[in-house]
């Protein structure tokens, strides 16, 4: 289902005290803000302690894991299963470019993880994006998505979230333009149908969020670096609400 979503990917940063302060500030700051679903994705060891702050009873703020394995249990040293996170997570990021690049995750594995998330009623935020920006590479994200989603039912496609993250725009403070992101997302939607929420990610901050969200093709953002700064992250959520309502 399409709706405005701002997800914060904290990656491998901070300690538990930092995480508790950040989550508390975000929850307090967004308590009164409606019209946006906010997802906080801390390192997995912080998920349970943070579930005391971001409780499952909150409708519009929830926790997401940054990764999970597809099997339910067994001899998979170092992995966490869907059932281990689903008590506290509404979402799970799957196939982030850093998982693909540094941990060798391919479409086959990512496909299994997406299916496992769906089976466990955890909403996957599936990340896709081209590695380099060339004249033709804007088509790569939709091709990758097609492989990642092989065999996933039409009904399930409406429940997942896709994040278009051009790898060349991640973590460098220089985002893609909203026009470019919208062009790629239009191709992505050809694989998904019109009811799936699609976010943009890659150097999103308080200065550029409005431009992305004002586009009718873009349903929100997956925010990395700026999600570690509570005030800026809250501002991003507030600006996104304004940009979307202006657009409607
Ligand atoms: P960034 O990260 O906002 O720091 O570019 C985005 C992401 O990797 O999800």
Image (spheres, rainbow, N blue to C red):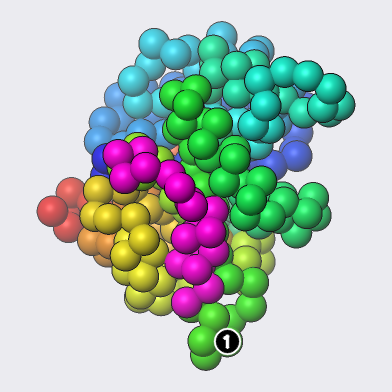
Q: Is residue 115 left or right of residue 196?
A: right
Give me the residue at 54% from left, 18% from top.
86
For the residue pair 209 and 104, the one nearer the viewer reads as: 104
Tell me if residue 181 is in the magenta stretch: no
Residue at (36, 70) in percent of width and height: 187
| Quarter of the image with the N terminus in it | top left
Answer few, some or many: residues within 10 Å of disc 1's Cα (few below 14, many 20 plus, some between 14 and 19).
few
Q: Position of residue 21 (x, y in %)?
A: 63, 23
Q: 6 above or below 120?
A: below
Task: Specify whether tag 1 is near ligand 1 (CB below 8 Å).
Answer: no
Counting from the top left corner in percent of width and height, residue 91 is at 49, 31
Q: Is residue 225 visible?
A: no
Residue position for label 1: 134
Describe residue 3's horizontal placement relative to residue 160 as left or right: left
- Magenta segment, prevailing SS (helix, strand or loop): helix
Q: Is residue 213 above or below residue 152?
A: below
Taking the image as four quarters, which one is ligand 1 found in? bottom right
**Dot 1: element:** loop
Q: In the image, what residue occupies the spot 64% across and 51% down?
A: 108
Magenta span covers which residues? Answer: 139-156
């Amino acid at each position: 289902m399409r709706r405005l979503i701002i997800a914060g990917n904290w990656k491998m940063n901070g300690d538990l005290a930092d995480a508790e302060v950040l989550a508390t500030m975000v929850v307090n700051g967004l308590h009164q803000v409606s019209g946006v679903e906010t997802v906080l994705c801390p390192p997995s060891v912080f998920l349970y302690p943070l579930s005391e702050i971001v409780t499952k009873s909150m409708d519009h703020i929830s926790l997401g894991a940054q990764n999970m394995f597809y099997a339910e249990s067994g001899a998979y040293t170092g992995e966490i299963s869907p059932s281990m996170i689903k008590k506290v997570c509404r979402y799970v990021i799957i196939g982030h470019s850093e998982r693909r690049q540094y941990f060798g995750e391919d479409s086959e594995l990512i496909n299994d993880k997406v299916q496992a998330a769906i089976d466990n009623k955890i909403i996957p935020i599936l990340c896709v994006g081209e590695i380099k920006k060339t004249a033709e590479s804007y088509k790569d994200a939709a091709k990758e998505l097609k492989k990642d989603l092989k065999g996933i039912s039409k009904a399930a496609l409406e429940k997942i979230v896709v994040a278009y993250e051009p790898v060349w725009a991640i973590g460098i403070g220089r985002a893609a333009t909203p026009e470019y992101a919208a062009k790629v997302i239009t191709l992505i939607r050809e694989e998904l149908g019109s009811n799936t929420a699609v976010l943009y990610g890659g150097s999103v901050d308080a200065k550029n969020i409005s431009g992305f969200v004002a586009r009718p093709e873009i349903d929100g953002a997956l925010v990395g670096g700026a999600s570690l700064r509570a005030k800026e992250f809250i501002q991003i959520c507030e600006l996104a609400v304004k940009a979307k309502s202006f657009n409607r």
